[in-house]
Amino acid sequence: AQSVTQLGSHVSVSEGALVLLRCNYSSSVPPYLFWYVQYPNQGLQLLLKYTSAATLVKGINGFEAEFKKSETSFHLTKPSAHMSDAAEYFCAVSGSGSARQLTFGSGTQLTVLP
Amino acid sequence: EAGVAQSPRYKIIEKRQSVAFWCNPISGHATLYWYQQILGQGPKLLIQFQNNGVVDDSQLPKDRFSAERLKGVDSTLKIQPAKLEDSAVYLCASSSTGTGMNEQFFGPGTRLTVL
């Protein structure tokens, strides 16, 4: 069984400030971890993914995430927020074999204040 | 490369009516998924196809939902009869393989409102 918990359903930051979106996972097998972004009335777009290579993963639009096995975390960060980053962000986990199904967290709505 | 196409984008029906959604995945993608995304929640997998065979439909409410992918390309998801709680966005996604590590590409979704 696998699950994802996203702490904070809403996060607000000022433009230019650090963005930190939290994600903790539970998985019975070595996990693959993903962050997706969803803009209004659009589908989900992959930001980055961890597939057991480097623990620090760089994605699109300046986002990165660090896999910490000891903390079962995969938090998403961006050094400087931009207005265009306002969207909903989903963390997701999958595994191998019978656990390959992608399980999503409940999402974090990011608001960027001018 | 064209993305995942879905239609219609919006649908409003009354409870107990029937509705169907269509999805055309990225060309060459063997795996196709249907997700239900209720407002304020993350997407939940309804069914996964590998080519034209069902891999996982454990979370599909089979008494009212059905899905098919007859020729291993496009797919249709049907709800009959619809209930109020079926109001959601229905997302279709595809990937080149069904392994857990492969990126899934999502379509824009169909927003269903059941009155």
Image (tube, rainbow, N blue to C red):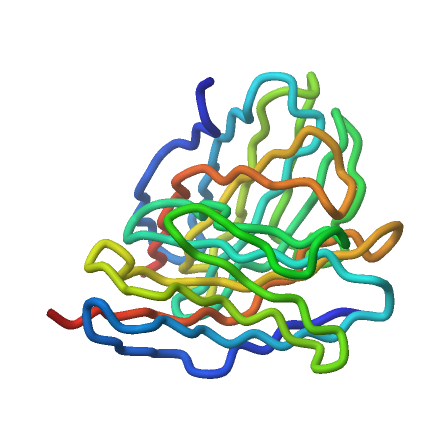
Q: Position of residue A4 (x, y in %)?
A: 63, 72
Tell me: residue A73, above or below residue A66.
below
Residue under the image location 51 percent in, 64 percent down: B42
Q: Is residue A76 left or right of residue A102?
A: left
Query: What's the residue at 61%, 51% (across, down)?
Result: A49
Of residue B22 and residue A15, the one placed in the foreground of this image is A15
Residue B23 lies left or right of residue A96; in this view the side is left
A50 relative to B36 in the view: left or right:
right
Visible in this render: residue B27? yes
Give residue A57's position: percent from left, percent from top. Answer: 59, 55
Answer whether residue B83 is visible to the viewer in this image: no
Which quarter of the picture shows residue B67?
top right
**Quarter of the image containing the C terminus of chain B?**
bottom left
Q: How many marks?
A: 0
Image height check: is B31 above or below B83?
above
Q: Is residue A91 above or below residue A44?
A: below
Q: Residue at x 64, y 34 (%)?
A: B95
Quarter holding residue B11: top left
Return the x and y of residue A26 as percentages of the image width and height: 74, 75
Query: Residue at horizontal 50%, vertical 59%?
Result: A64
B5 is higher (above) or lower (below) than B2 = below
Give residue A107's position: percent from left, percent from top: 46, 69
